[in-house]
Image (cartoon, grey):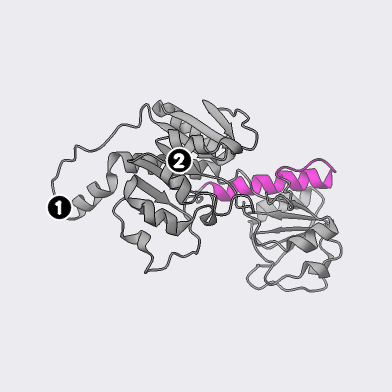
Amino acid sequence: MKVLFTVKYDEEKINMVKDLGYEVIYKSEKIIENTEEINTADVLVTYDSFSRLDINQMKNLKYIQTTSVGIDQLPKQEIVEREIIVSNNRGGYSIPIGEWIVKSILDIYKNTVSFYKNQKNKVWKPDFTTKEVSGIRVGFLGTGTIAMEAAKRLKAFDVEVWGVNTKGSIREYFDKCFSTSNLDEIFKSCDVVVASMPSTKETIGLVNKDKFELMNEGSVFINIGRGDLINQDDLIDCIGKFRGVALDVFEEEPLSEDNKLWDFDNVIVTPHNSWWSDKNPDRVFDLVYNNLKKFINNDNLKNVVDLKRGY
């Protein structure tokens, strides 16, 4: 069985894959193109090679393993029609993103941005508007692995954690969960709202002016899900009510220089960076390796994606 890698791993890791019984082909996705050899691959391990690679020419392809969490780059129609299995890296970035959420809440409650600015300008200026996070209520739109990793860490700060999922099923580290039909409870009752849902036809534009107006004065909004979960113009219109807003994802990336979000003192902008960690490469390879092992042994794979649902 042949596996095509478009992401590079060292010789030790490649040998581990070969020991499973695979013939390994490597070609960087920056230069990859369909060739007779590449078209014989049974498995494709890739981040995003689909702008250069035509999977319709890969007649043996049965399984695609993405090293990304998102699947927007996939040629979904062809994959569904051919019933190719797709597995993603769901959960692979949850720890660093969970840490980023905690960091953002602390930044906003402790006014760290203004302290850093004062330090840079050598200004000694005490600030008595900082607040404790102990006892606040944080609500997550989505209770997947990212939200769970953040919730686990927030419990150490004595934070009450609420969440929203399809059926309102309770999750570990959550004090209360609501169904999506009761979504407004999160906006009305939480001090901090964190958008951590995937982008689907049901969630695009879900957080709009109506939702922002439900939130309390001095509350906090954070988005690490997808940029299109929120109506960005509506957020800008409501920006004055928030103690702070932290955004790592945007409708269009990179964020244009003339976008108003850069200019607000209560907004933290980061360049879609929350997912990165020095431990990511090893964590991703562990998933790839274990799924390749399962696939060659006809076992159930981890993180199989339902392309019709979008996650």
Quarter residue 259 falls in: bottom left
Across and down, in percent, residue 85 comes to 79, 52
Magenta stretch contains residue 36: no
Viewer-nearest residue: 232 or 60: 232
**Residue holding disc 1:** 122
Q: How far apart are marks 2 and 1 (CA)?
A: 34 Å
Quarter residue 106 falls in: top left
Type of residue at label 2?
Answer: Val
57 vs 264: above or below: below
Name the residue at 28% across, 34% down. 131
What range of the chain is rendered magenta?
Answer: 279-303
**Residue holding disc 2:** 193
> Of tags 2 and 1, which is closer to the observer?
2
Across and down, in percent, residue 94 comes to 55, 43
Magenta segment, prevailing SS (helix, strand or loop):
helix
55 vs 306: above or below: below
240 vs 28: above or below: above
